[in-house]
Amino acid sequence: MYEYIRGKIVAIKEEYIVLDNNDIGYKIFTSGNSISKLQLNEICTMYIYFNLREDGIYLYGFIDEEELEIFNLLLLVSKIGPKTALGTLSALTPNQIKNAIVNNDLNTLCTAPGIGKKTAGRIVLELKDKLKDHVVVENVNIEDTNEINTAIHGLMSLGYTRSEIIQVINKINTEDLNAEDIIRESLKRLSKN
């Protein structure tokens, strides 16, 4: 129903944010990973999962499509609902989850709240085939500066995913560049892909 909602963050709570879009405040449940990258009064895009239940309508959202993709994959596993999937994405990054599934690493999956050995085993069993083409990638280490963060958010608003942006930014010497220059240089490289 919804692909994404773009708006201003007017509240950040422990498990959700309130995103103002055209004077409508959307309560969007999100992961700790997404919340940690957001700031009050910031304009952002949240990629949405719409959940209609007997007791209400719930929106789950993430700042990048990769996190939404993993959320949707986790929901395919029997006995895993949105709350457990969200808890898993709060404890682990999408890359850590993918790597744990591909490598049969049940211990890593068990670090997420609500995930025991049986559930971790089900996740691996039911999702391994869906991730068989996944290349194990180490977490990228780019310097976490305000200029880089601003550039990443700017590029994400243009439709690029966080992972492809970080791969490009890692190849740029950002030492003396401001956010605008980083965006310009990144767009040159992204347009060649």
Image: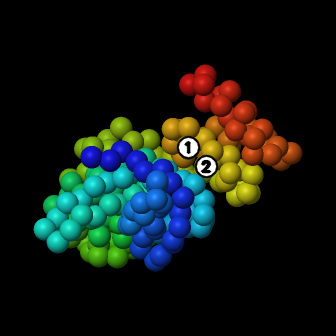
Position of the C terminus, as image quadrant, is top right
Which is more toward the observer, 67 or 130? 67
Secondary element type, mark 2: helix
Looking at the image, which residue is at 20% across and 60% down? 52
Residue matched to label 1: 157
Residue 139, horizontal then vertical, whole percent: 56, 53
- The kind of residue tagged 2 is His
Residue matched to label 2: 153
Residue 47, horizontal then vertical, whole percent: 41, 50
- Crowd tier of the residue under label 1, counting other residues whose Cα lies within 10 Å: few below 14, some 14–19, many 20 or above: some
Residue 146 circle label: none
Way the structure is coloured: rainbow
* Visible residue check, residue 101: no
The quadrant where residue 56 appears: bottom left
Question: Label 1 vs label 2: CA separation?
Answer: 6 Å
Seen in the picture, residue 124 relative to 190 is either above or below; the reply is below
Secondary element type, mark 1: loop
Looking at the image, which residue is at 42% across and 70% down? 16
Which is more toward the observer, 171 or 148? 148
Looking at the image, which residue is at 46% across and 55% down? 21
Residue 34, horizontal then vertical, whole percent: 49, 62
Q: Is residue 169 left or right of residue 116?
A: right
Seen in the picture, residue 23 relative to 90 is either above or below; the reply is above
